[in-house]
Amino acid sequence: MSYARGGSLNLDHALAARELHHLRTNLEAGIFRQRLHAAENLYQRNLAGHYGCVNALEFSHGGEYLASGGDDKRVLLWHVDQTLASVGQEEPNVMYGEHASNIFCLGFDSHNKYVFSGGNDDLVIQHDLGTGKNLNYFSHDGPVYGLSVDRTSTNLFSVATEHGEILVYDLRAGKTDPQAIAKCRTPFNAVEFHPLNGNFLATANAKRGAQLWDLRHHTQALCQYNYITESPSCMSVRFNCNGSLLLTLHRRLPPILYSPSSSEPLCSFYHDEYFNSCTMKSCTFAGPQDELVVSGSDNFNMFIWRLDGVDLEKKNQWIDTLPVILTGHRSIVNQVRYNRQRCLLASSGVEKIIKFWSPFSQHGWEGSLTEPSDTPYCTRTLHRNASDHVSQDFSTRNMEEDQVMLAFFDTLVQRELETWNCTSSTGNATGHQTISSDSSSASSTEHSESSTQSEEEQSEVDTPNVSELSWLTHPNRIFYLIAKKRRALLELAVKGTGGQHRNVEQLLARLMGEQRQVATQARISEWLEETHRLFGDDDLPTTSAEAAARERCRRESISQPASRSPRKPPELRMGKSTKSAFIQLERKRKLMRLRFAAIKRRRTVRRPRRGLQENDSAVAYDTEGFEEEDDNAPPVAANVANDVNNDNDNEGDDDDDDDDEEESNSNPDDSTSNTSMEAQLSQAPSTSNSLHFVLDASEANNNSQMAENNNNKINNGIPTAGACHSETTTSTSSSSQANI
């Protein structure tokens, strides 16, 4: 009886412990999900330990360890919890056996006893996780680009080789006679076991794209996923935790999501700044329920898309909602991996460092969770002309930033974008892009589609009007070149989802409109900050509309005659929208700046223009003679003057870009206003000239008021045909009388 009672108590204790464990894991997953859902940024920390580029990352099962490998031919093992808890730099464990060349891929067995590494020396090495010693060597006919260990078995692992083979090894049978699943003339870049059924493999080939294989019937692929003729080269495949979704990454395309049993894509993720062409990259799922998709980019940033808007019952969806963009890397980001147990992202690439990303603030970490980065791009100066031959010496064990390596990849990205022939097929295979440490040249192969067409031919396929946008939307040359190829990249992304029911021109017009709005808002913010700095206004306007209304009221109070009764407040008599008022204000300010610049240079007096419109809120000026500027005049002055004159003559007309924007904007007036404002602001001088402009404007207003007072004195009692406002560089009464 007592034994039965004791047994029941032990059973109750075991059940309670299991329920508490289930509750705790669900609670952690809920916290992770909430923080990732609210994230606009993540906290970050650098890990230093490698002497060269870090080409491979992999978390162990359970997330306790992180393995990393790179150009320095070493496999490092990081204890994740100790690394997170350490305030300073945590020293990783180094596996004893080294490769003879670059390491490209890594994998843990299901029990975390071994870690496998493959590389450019045609070898796969099996390392003992406890001792760090080498247990086995597996030789191949070419470099090993991909590696995957079966999660349902402790004895099976597969490799993808440059020689065009997918091989499966069984450790029980030794390292001889592996099973050849697939053979192709072009390289296999990646391979991935299904997480719940080890009979299925997903592969990424440089010519055949993404495929699914059955080990039991491997004479042909079980499923050929959507073949993209213009960009067949696939470099990464990744299952989610239960194998219900498959993520693929093709060259020059953002990630594409599939159901493993269907050849048609569920959706394609898009962002106009994402670019993937110059190096071999990976993609991964993230989040407690794999609700995030993560990939690195050639513009040094990481992109995180959410699956919130994806309908798993539909096909060929287009996801262009704004992703979370993580900044902090100083060169191309190649590898991304997610630690499910600790809600931790790891990333690496051309740099020697590894980055940890977390939604939780920790001591010594940088960044924020709800505030995007202040600088959404790398702030270092880009290199333009690097050497085509790079040699590395790891004997010095230098972990400092390698400027030669950064310069090589800076130049590689820019040349790729400059020479890419958008009109030709982009399906040629590319080699594994990485730097070889045992030779004086880069092992990255030349892209066979490098264009030889002339600049005239190249400009025809570039995105139109990009050069006319403000450089504030193109923070460096890589961003600018990506924008120049936006049309071609957009067309490729649309074809990646079948191109059904999707108008490329409308999508492009919307992107260009958003680009203009960003540039305009940046210029407005810059102008408001400069105004506050110059005048010290405690009540700084918070919006462009408020600033325009305040400026208009100030101008009317200056130009209004003393004999007239006070007018109604401007907010009660404004007939136009605030955006139109602000556009008119900017035109007047620009005319005023150009007029006074010409007056100062010539030291002559110009006659005012009669016929001021009744509804105008500022003085109108004659621009006659502006075409003959002297040699010291800025080259943009004539163009701006012509633009202003054209705007004043044709205020209701829209340019070609406005017609495109009206297709995607619900309010055509707002679209026209934004476009006109951006066209003027993009040609405005920098804020360094704002002080001269403000002083000139103040002087103009004073002179105008004094001249008007003199006119009232002289013409006392004499009716005139219209209001006449004089504008001179002097404030003497004789000048005013001369103009009358």
Image (cartoon, grey):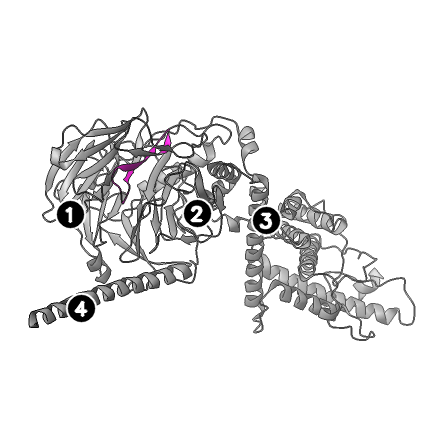
Mark 3 to mark 1 CA distance (whole Å): 52 Å
**Seen in the image, is 616 located left or right of residue 301?**
right
**Span highlighted in magenta in the image:** 191-210
Task: Please name the residue shown 61% across and 60% down the image.
Answer: 692
Of the two numbered discs 3 and 2 on the same chain, state the one appearing first in sequence: 2
Query: Is 488 on the left-hand or right-hand side of 23?
Result: right
* Among the 4 quarters of the image, the one containing residue 403: top left
Are discs 1 and 2 less than 8 Å apart at CB? no
Tag 1, which secondary structure?
A: strand
Q: How many angstroms separate mark 4 from mark 2 (CA)?
A: 41 Å
Tag 4: residue type? Asp
Asked which secondary structure carries label 2, the reply is loop
Q: Could you classify mark 1 by the number of other residues whose Cα lies within 10 Å: few (under 14), some (14-19), or many (20 or more)?
A: some
Q: The disc labelled 1 sits on which kind of residue?
A: Val
- In the image, residue 133 sits, relative to residue 33, either above or below, namely above
Query: Disc 1 vs disc 4: which is toward the camera?
Result: 4
The residue pinned by badge 3 equals 513
Residue 700, image x and y in percent?
71, 63
The residue carrying pointer 3 sits among few (fewer than 14), some (14 to 19) or many (20 or more) residues within 10 Å by Cα, namely many
Toward the right, the furthest residue is: 718
Of pointers 3 and 4, the one earlier in the residue sequence: 4
Which amino acid is tagged 3? Answer: Gly
Compare residues 479 and 180 and report the one nearer the observer.
180
Residue that numbered label 1 is attached to: 94
Q: Nearer the viewer, mark 1 or mark 2?
A: 2
Quadrant of the image for the C terminus? bottom right
The label on residue 577 is: none
User: How far across and how far down the image is residue 128, in percent?
Assistant: 12, 44
Relative to residue 501, is residue 157 drawn left or right?
Answer: left
Give the residue pinned by disc 2. Answer: 312
**Residue linked to disc 4:** 12
Sequence-earlier tag: 3 or 1: 1
